[in-house]
Amino acid sequence: ARHCKDNSECKGDVQPADFVPYIEYKSMLRVYQWIGAGRDSDGHLEPLAQFWLANKSSMSSEWIEDDILGSRLENEESDIIPPPRCYTSWTVQPATDSEKDMYRAQEKLRYEKPHKAYTFRMHGYESVVGPVKGIYTQQTGLNKARGHSLLVPDRPAYVTILSLVRDAVARLPNGEGTRSDICELLKESQYLAPLINSTAENNLNSVVSGALDRLHYENDPCVKYDTPRKLWIYLHRNRNEEEFERMHHLNGPGGNKIKKPAPRRQSRAKAKDPLNMKGPPNVALEPTSSPTK
């Protein structure tokens, strides 16, 4: 676990803002698992290596003692999948021009009040999505959006790939679907740049995979991958707008933030005692199947 050496150097996590983990520690098995398949080309890893070289003086590491009970509770909680609020027989398919216009009108309203939950109404069913992460007040739109090859430059600063993928996941019929379904729904967004060739399509698939991984590891994850069925499940599919906003403010400034059970750290005295020193857990870094399909 990496952390800052002292408070003067701590500016959030010492990692890029859009970083998605490449390795996951399985507490029950005491092994590390590679989850970076599809995101481990030189083009992805070289910038991370440069970032590490520039910031390594602010990083340190220590072994974390397993909290088996915490891991078990976390796994049991993640196994609870709520039923959909609105059942539908509609299946994802390329949108017509009129369907795109209808969705984009609703999307515009959704991002006019990003600090509020919103209900999309398309294809005869409702899809509720929570407020944009980190936005707690009405935004003025004075900040300029960060550049992104897949997004149009003329957009609100808080419209990101992560927020658009979350919207697409929320709109899955019955709250479940494949990554291809999510990409298809994402293509309806007015904030997505035109996909002019197959390279752009492949790039979209890769970026969506990374976004799904990141959403999967949030404190209050909205997605989970169902391996036997090879589907992504929208875990918030039965929440209403009021529940979303209550949870949003609980995790906001001044709220009692809801966190996953965290592994217990060894005390410094215990960690330095040679009699209590433990070797590192088994390491298995061979590529294994990523949760993203």
Image: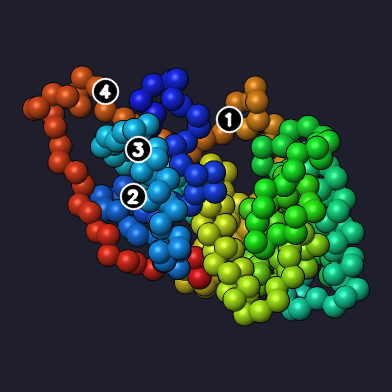
Q: CA distance from mark 4 to mark 2?
A: 21 Å
Which amino acid does the dot numbered 4 rest on?
A: Ser
Secondary structure, mark 1, is: loop
Secondary structure, mark 2, is: strand
Find residue 258 and report its horizontal and vertical position in percent. Answer: 56, 33
Q: CA distance from mark 3 to mark 2?
A: 21 Å
Using the image, tell me which numbered label, if any, was put on residue 274: none
Secondary structure, mark 4, is: loop
Q: Is residue 291 above or below residue 156?
A: below
**What count of labels does the image hold?**
4
Which amino acid does the dot numbered 1 rest on?
A: Lys
Q: Report the residue marked by disc 2.
A: 25
Using the image, tell me which numbered label, if any, was put on residue 257: 1
Crowdedness of circle 4 by 10 Å Cα count: few (<14), some, many (20+)? Answer: few
Q: CA distance from mark 4 to mark 3?
A: 24 Å
Crowdedness of circle 2 by 10 Å Cα count: few (<14), some, many (20+)? Answer: some
Q: Are the residues flagged by discs 1 and 3 in contact, CB closer than 8 Å?
A: no
Q: Earlier in the sequence, mark 3 or mark 2?
A: 2
Q: Report the residue marked by disc 3.
A: 56
Q: Quadrant of residue 271?
A: top left
Using the image, tell me which numbered label, if any, was put on residue 267: 4
